[in-house]
Image (cartoon, rainbow, N blue to C red):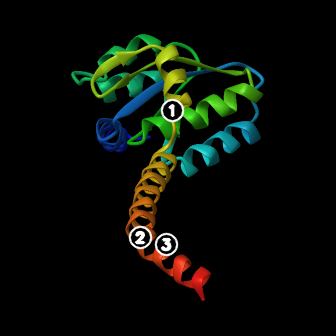
Amino acid sequence: MLRQEKEAFVSHIREELMGSSIVVALSRQPGITVEEITKLRKDMHEAESNLRILKNTLARIAIKDSTLESIGQYLEGSTGLAYSKNPVGMAKAISEFIKTNEKLTILGGVMDGKAISPNIIKELASLPSMDELRAKIIGLLTAAASKIVRTVKEPSARVARVIAAKS
């Protein structure tokens, strides 16, 4: 890459990382295959997340003088950066992958400008997704509405049952 291309690339990566609400550093162990990484990328894409395998020097330049600078301590060896605007979805995708493949490790991350530990990322994975929360809220609203309808119609239904019994 030419210097200008590198500068443009680093600028693009910086914008992507800064536009995310969570950035996680992942350590790749030797022996992880291209197919496994491709599967992880696909799962993360479905969770509206991204995974970038960058040179550590380019990643350090991209996060320099930003709220993500604390993640620089993890940029040693073979690492990748996962980032997303959907922290729960990304954490679930990474955790599901790690359950079946121990060649990937969560090192740490930054969420909304604050450093987070791998344990917090694992806790995020246990939270319900936005779709699950929406479904629960809709279920609660429809249950309440159906109870109101039942309560309102019950007096007239009683009258109808009494008339039907007398005839």
Residue 13's spot in the image, x, y percent?
A: 36, 39
In the picture shown, does residue 33 fall above or below 9?
above
**Residue lying farthest to the bottom in this orientation:** 167
Whether the residues at callouts 3 and 2 have beta carbons within 8 Å, the answer is yes
On the image, which quarter does residue 9 sit in? top left
Q: How far is mark 3 from mark 2, CA to CA?
A: 5 Å
Q: Kindly identify the amino acid type of the residue bearing the numbered disc 2.
A: Pro
Residue shown at the point (33%, 44%) measured from the top left: 12
* Residue at 52 percent of width and 47 percent of height: 132
Tell me, for residue 127, which label it has, or none. 1
What separation in Å lies between label 1 and label 2 (alpha carbons)? Answer: 43 Å
* Residue shown at the point (31%, 23%) measured from the top left: 68
Task: Decide which of tag 1 and tag 3 comes sooner along the chain.
Answer: 1
Q: Mark 1 or mark 2: name the one nearer the start of the chain.
A: 1
For residue 109, above or below residue 164:
above
Q: Is residue 143 or residue 149 the one in the foreground?
A: 149
Q: CA distance from mark 1 to mark 3?
A: 45 Å
Please name the residue that numbered disc 3 is placed on: 158
Identify the residue position indicated by label 2 in the image: 155
15 relative to 81 in the view: left or right: left
